[in-house]
Amino acid sequence: MYQDPEATRLEEARTAKKPWRKWEPYLSERQWGTVREDYSQDGNAWDYFTHDQARSRAYHWGEDGLAGISDDKQLPCSSVALWNGNDPILKERLFGLTNSQANHGEDVKEYYFYLDSTPTHSYMKYLYKYPQAAFPYNDLIETNRQRNRADMEYELLDTGVFSGEILFFEYFHGDNGAGLGASHQTGWTGVVARLIELFGRLNALQFLEAGKLGAFAQGESTSRDRVDYEFAASAK
């Protein structure tokens, strides 16, 4: 009789046979439920621990990161770090405005999506939209600072950072499709090389008969001015 694998995992977690709930996405993208941490002398909680400081200061009571996971005590934490070749810092956590910087209060100015997850988090899928132009940190701060409560919020999409065409080049070996390098640091060389390899295995007539949707799984569309990072984690 067929037993659903996730149902088995849930039963293992319930009976403590396996610690499926030990590792989960307890790690927040941006640890600002109210403020990060406040040890200020004057009680200025919102400005004490800024986003700019977060990349070089240690937390006492938590951590944050992109597509991050941790154990149930949030002791060991793991997340990804990205770089588009233009930012002065690595992209390690979501950027947002503090309560005093934004015209409608604290607000994250990024785009990220939880696409899928099993109840035990044995499989998780996460999508983050990362501009390939320099991230407009100062523009978001200064423009929102000038707006009042009656004004619309100034969002990342409003900055135009996704509207341009940032051109880049990939280089491949003509015979075997091996990646030879790129003019950017987005990591697409290996992906494209893999697609070239897979395409070389296809029967051309079968490909034409089945159509491209029958030969390849349909995925997220990617503009030339942006790289969409999908992170998927799975466990058996």
Image: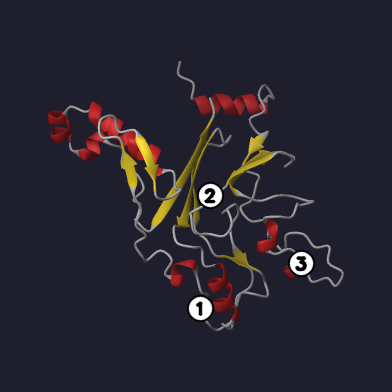
Tell me: 30 left or right of 47. left
Label at residue 152: 1
Residue bearing mark 3: 48
Q: Earlier in the sequence, mark 2 or mark 1?
A: 2
Bin the neighbour count of mark 3 within 10 Å (Cα to Cα): few under 14, some 14-19, many 20 and up: some
Amino acid tagged 2: Leu
Residue bearing mark 2: 82
> Alpha-carbon distance for marks 3 and 2?
26 Å
Tell me: 164 left or right of 203. right
Label at residue 107: none
Looking at the image, which is closer to me, 154 or 185? 185
Secondary structure state at the residue bearing disc 1: loop
Residue under the image location 25 percent in, 34 percent down: 174
Q: Earlier in the sequence, mark 3 or mark 2?
A: 3
Residue 104, image x, y percentages:
60, 75
In the picture as drawn, the residue positioned furthest to the right comes out as 41
